[in-house]
Image (cartoon, helix red, strand yellow):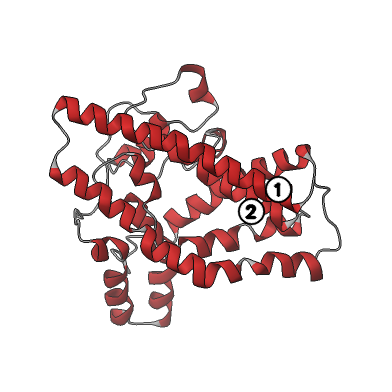
Amino acid sequence: MNAGTIERLGNQIEDAFFIIGAAILLIELATAWFKGSLKGRSIVEMLVSASTQIPLLAIEIFIMTGAYGIYFIIADTLVPWSLPINWWIVALAIFVADFVYYWEHRIAHEVRILWTQHAVHHSSREFNILTGIRFGPLEGLWSLVAHIPMVFLGFPPELVFVGIISVLAYQTWIHTETIGKLGPLEKILNTPSHHRVHHGCDDKYLDKNYGGVLIAWDRIFGSFQAEDETPRYGLKRDFNSQNPFLVWFSELPQLWRDLKAAKSGREFLMRLFARPGWQPK
């Protein structure tokens, strides 16, 4: 197994979940059409979700593509060991990437400067397949940093990329209300039911179910919540805009105002790195 094989594997995983996601989207649209619930606002909301890919892809192309070179620099200059590339290590890389994703995701909810990006993903009052591609422009930067420990563990950068892609691609299909609960799979995997909870802004659902592929991490680390009733989706605060620019940068104006109003260096830092909603006493 070589780098070319690894790259093709990553592309195949991404393509497979894209096809699954596209099929679910068609089912969602057809179901809404026959029920008469496919309204203009829902279509606009889907388009707004898709629009977040514009700044994201621009940054990925012009900044992140080069930034990911840090993995190769670290591997070549700072890590004198490397795990062999075989199917067992590929599986291990995906497993470890899923563990890393859990903490990457959880921390993005708990640190305000990171939340300014991840909040974009949570800002829709709708929940459908296109919500799954609704991302903040700079989310990839935190993902890059969060996965650096995998390089130090000896995973070749190519396998780190496969792990990241696999975990993100898996989550394409779980952004839907079309699929109900999945029996025994609910105990192990992150499912649409579990992820509906994650997107809920009801008090009981806030900051729950961070897992990517496995829901086991949430069960282990105390952040699991089962879906009892249909959540109310979106941000806790009153945000319901369908202006793409307001969606892309929804959290930044208030952060800027809070930073300008900070009365001390400590408050300035807390505004950046404390939990969203933190206020000085």
Q: Tell me whether circle 1 and circle 2 mark residues in contact (CB < 8 Å).
A: yes
Residue at screen point 54% across, 37% down? 213
On residue 64, which mark appears? none
Label 1 vs 2, first from the N-terminus: 1
Circle 1: element type: helix
Give the residue at mark 1. 6
Residue at screen point 33% across, 82% down? 263
- Mark 1 or 2: in front is 1
Q: Can you say whether 272 is above or below 11 in the image?
A: below
Q: Can you say whether 64 is above or below 127 in the image?
A: below
Q: Can you say whether 180 is above or below 135 in the image?
A: above
On residue 161, which mark appears? 2
Whether residue 206 is visible, yes or no, is no
Circle 2: element type: helix
Q: Nearer the viewer, residue 36 or 84?
A: 36
Q: Residues within 10 Å of mark 2 (few under 14, many from 20)?
A: many
* Residue 39 horizontal/vertical position (percent): 14, 39
Q: Is residue 213 left or right of residue 2?
A: left
* Residue 262 horizontal/vertical position (percent): 32, 79
* Residue 33 horizontal/vertical position (percent): 19, 30
Q: Nearer the viewer, residue 64 or 102?
A: 64
Residue type at tag 1: Ile
Residue type at tag 2: Phe
